[in-house]
Image (cartoon, rainbow, N blue to C red):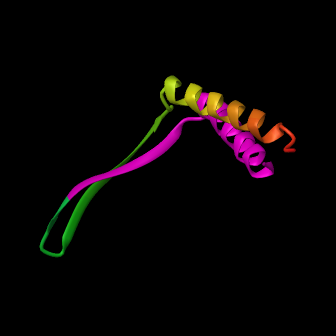
Amino acid sequence: MKIFFVLGLMLLVLGIASLFIPIPHRQTHGFKAGGIEVGVQTTESEKVHPGISAAMILGGVALLVVGGRKSG
């Protein structure tokens, strides 16, 4: 049951962090013509949808409860 507690704690921390920390991703746009390559790289940062963060937090709490119970 300890593995559920650890997974729940990790999921809870990731869920809370996803509310505040944006996730960056890069895109490259361009073309090649023979041996010449022209391109532009853009970087955008987006936050995770709050519903997904809430599901991660609730799932983490549920795993913490299950993992915190004593077996036997």
Please provide percent x and percent y for residue 49.
48, 27
Q: Quadrant of residue 61?
A: top right
Does the magenta run of residues contain 51?
no
Q: Residue at x 52, y 41 (%)?
A: 23
Please provide percent x and percent y for residue 53.
57, 29
Please provide percent x and percent y for residue 3.
75, 52
Most prominent secondary structure in the magenta stretch? helix
In this rendering, the answer to whether 13 lies above or below 32 is above
Please provide percent x and percent y for residue 63.
70, 38
Q: Nearer the viewer, residue 19 or 29?
A: 19
In this rendering, the answer to whether 69 lies above or below 39 is above
Q: Quadrant of residue 14?
A: top right
Residue furthest out toward the left: 34
Q: Residue at x 75, y 37 (%)?
A: 66
Does the magenta run of residues contain 27?
yes
Horizontal placement of 2 versus 43: left or right? right
Residue range highlighted in magenta: 1-30
Q: How many marks?
A: 0
